[in-house]
Each structure stands twice: as structure tokens, then as C-alpha cells.
Amino acid sequence: MLLSGFEVHGTYQLLGWDKAVDLHSTAAWALMGLWVLAIFWHFTTGEWRQYIPTAHKMLDVALFYAFGMFRGEHHPYLKTRDRKHNPLQRVAYLGVKLFINPLIWCSGLFYLFYNQLAAAGFSGLALGTVALVHTFAAFLMLLFLIAHVYLGTAGHTPTAHFKAMLTGWDDDVYEESQAAQAK
């Protein structure tokens, strides 16, 4: 989405504008469908509870990411099946789900259906404003992606956390957490 979006924006030319628009639109519909399924899954399984923010150990986790991981310290947050995300992850994912994703959806749909907006009662909305909001949301998602890639390489090996990002569960951390809690 970012690659085709930046080409539509005119940042570079690889596929050509028409193909980039088609790819971007098709990928956007597929991604929105995936987001709808993910929301359904979160609510039907109760996994939405993983995103309830907490301040408990937030400062410890922030200090770990700022300094501790570079000193070889152990992560201060112990994961369990019921608490898969540390306090900073919870806030970040909640921000993505409640702010960035809806901003991308709404601005993208307004962009896609701009010529029909007046009939829907949005006659005063300038195309430049819609484009700016959509681009702003894309940059926020890019920042989130960069943070994900960076933190994915910050494990005990450069790829240790990518398995957890893809599967949603980190077996090694869960085993360490269980051992630490048993003490």
C-alpha cells in the first residue's frame, strides 16, 4: 500500500500512475476486508482485551527499550496467554486500531469516492484536504512499520521477534515468563 500510494502521490515512477492507482485501490479493498475480519475475530474471541491500556510497568518497559535492551537486561514485562502485549504495545496497537486505521479508511474512501461526496452531504470538503489527511495517515502507518521492523530486530537475535509478529505468539518469551513466575 505504501509503495503504490507513494507512486500515486508522484514520489517516483515504477508501475505508472494508472497501474499504481489500480493496485492501490485493489489492495485497499482487500486490506479493509482483512481489517473487518480482524475486528470480528477480536470481538468474537475476546482478544480485544489485549488492547486495554494499562500504566502498570509502562515506565519500566519504556526504560527497557531506551536503555535496558542495549545493556542486555531482561524485559521487565512477563507475557502470559491473557497478557500478550506489554503496556507500550497496548497503547501503540490501540492507537493504530482506533486512530490511524479509521483515518486511513475514511480519507481513502473519501478520496476514492470524491466525486460522489457532494451528493452525500460533504460538498465543502476540498480534494487537497482529503489527500493531505490520507498522506498524513500513511506517514503515521509508515512510522508504525519502521518501529515494528526496528523492534523486530531488537531480540536476542536479529530475527527473534519476527516469528511472534507473524504468528502472534512468542514461545520463547512465554516459556521464560512461566519460569520466572514459578520462582
Image (cartoon, rainbow, N blue to C red):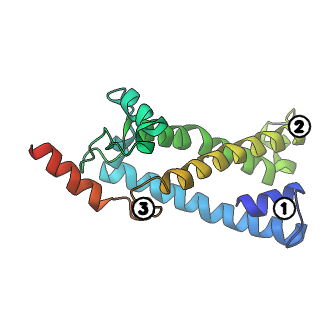
Q: Looking at numbered disc 2 in the image, what kind of residue is underneath it?
A: Ala
| Residue at mark 2 | 126
Q: Nearer the viewer, residue 93 or 74?
A: 74
Q: Helix, strand or loop at disc 1?
A: helix
Q: Looking at numbered disc 3 in the image, what kind of residue is underneath it?
A: Thr
Give percent across and percent down for residue 160.
41, 62
**Dot 3 alpha-carbon crowd within 10 angstroms: few under 14, some 14 to 19, many 20 or more:** few
| Residue at mark 3 | 157
| Residue sitting at x 42%, y 61% | 157
| Residue sitting at x 83%, y 44% | 131
- Spatial CA span between label 3 and label 1: 34 Å
| Residue 106 visible in the current orientation | no
Q: Nearer the viewer, residue 145 or 181?
A: 181
C-beta proximity under 8 Å, tags 3 and 1:
no
Give percent across and percent down for residue 34.
53, 61
Q: Looking at numbered disc 1 in the image, what kind of residue is underneath it?
A: Glu
Q: Which corner quadrant of the image does residue 89 belong to?
A: top left
Label 3 vs label 1, nearer the camera: 3
Name the mark on residue 7.
Answer: 1
Give the quarter of the figure containing the C terminus: top left
Q: Helix, strand or loop at disc 2?
A: loop
Q: Earlier in the sequence, mark 3 or mark 1?
A: 1
Q: Nearer the viewer, residue 37 or 49?
A: 49
Label 3 vs label 2, nearer the camera: 3
**Dot 2 alpha-carbon crowd within 10 angstroms: few under 14, some 14 to 19, many 20 or more:** few
Q: Is residue 20 above or below residue 47?
A: below
Q: Nearer the viewer, residue 43 or 67?
A: 67
